Image (cartoon, helix red, strand yellow):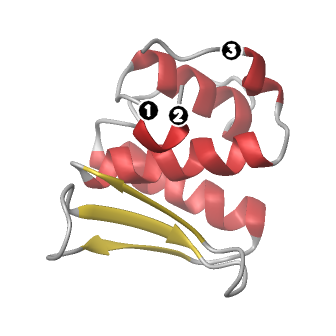
């Protein structure tokens, strides 16, 4: 599964909880803006970088989330919602860091 196109839902939320919140209660990070904001703070704390989120008018889907580590390694995801853009960014970052969630496949 391509993490840049991961679908919102419980499977994704379980993986994010395992990586960013050490298996505490799974929340709807990929669908609820309030919980997505908590995920944003967790990403920023873990990577010591600001996460930029916003809307783009030139592409669909319209929401983006970006972590600018440096100009050559920034990571950006697009999605239909704020929450899903952040969830996809979190998944991409976790997979890049060889996290244990790599072994848990997402449904197509």
Can the viewer see residue 26? Answer: no
Residue denoted by label 3:
104
| Image coords of residue 5 (percent x, y) | 41, 38
Residue denoted by label 1:
6
| Image coords of residue 38 (percent x, y) | 49, 52
Q: How many marks?
A: 3
In this rendering, the answer to whether 9 lies above or below 86 is above
Of badges 2 and 1, the one in the foreground is 2
Examine the image and state in which quarter residue 99 appears: top right
Can the viewer see residue 67? Answer: yes
Image point 76% across, 16% down: which residue? 103
Mark 3 or mark 2: whose residue is earlier in sequence: 2
> Is 37 on the left or on the right of 16, as rendered?
left
Quarter of the picture containing the C terminus is top left
Dot 2 falls on a residue whose secondary structure is: loop
Question: Tags 2 and 1 in contact by the CB under 8 Å rule?
Answer: yes
Image point 68% across, 36% down: which residue? 21
Whole-number angstrom distance, CA of label 2 to CA of label 1: 6 Å
Image point 75% across, 30% down: which residue? 22
Mark 1 or mark 3: whose residue is earlier in sequence: 1
Whole-number angstrom distance, CA of label 3 to CA of label 2: 13 Å
Residue denoted by label 2:
2
Whole-number angstrom distance, CA of label 1 to CA of label 3: 13 Å
Q: Are there few (<14), some (14-19), or many (20+) residues within 10 Å of tag 2?
A: few
Quarter of the picture containing the N terminus is top right
Q: Nearer the viewer, residue 12 or 33?
A: 12
| Image coords of residue 100 (percent x, y) | 83, 26
Dot 1 falls on a residue whose secondary structure is: loop
Find the residue positioned furthest to the left: 57
């Amino acid at each position: 599964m391509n993490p840049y196109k991961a679908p919102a839902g419980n499977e994704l939320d379980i993986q994010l909880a395992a990586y960013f919140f050490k298996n505490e209660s799974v929340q709807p990070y990929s669908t609820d803006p309030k919980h997505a904001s908590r995920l944003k703070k967790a990403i920023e704390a873990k990577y010591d970088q600001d996460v930029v989120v916003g809307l783009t008018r030139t592409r669909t889907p319209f929401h983006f989330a970006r972590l600018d580590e440096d100009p050559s390694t920034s990571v950006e995801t697009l999605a239909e919602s704020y929450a899903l853009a952040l969830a996809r960014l979190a998944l991409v970052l976790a997979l890049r860091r060889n996290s244990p969630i790599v072994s848990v496949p997402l449904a197509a």
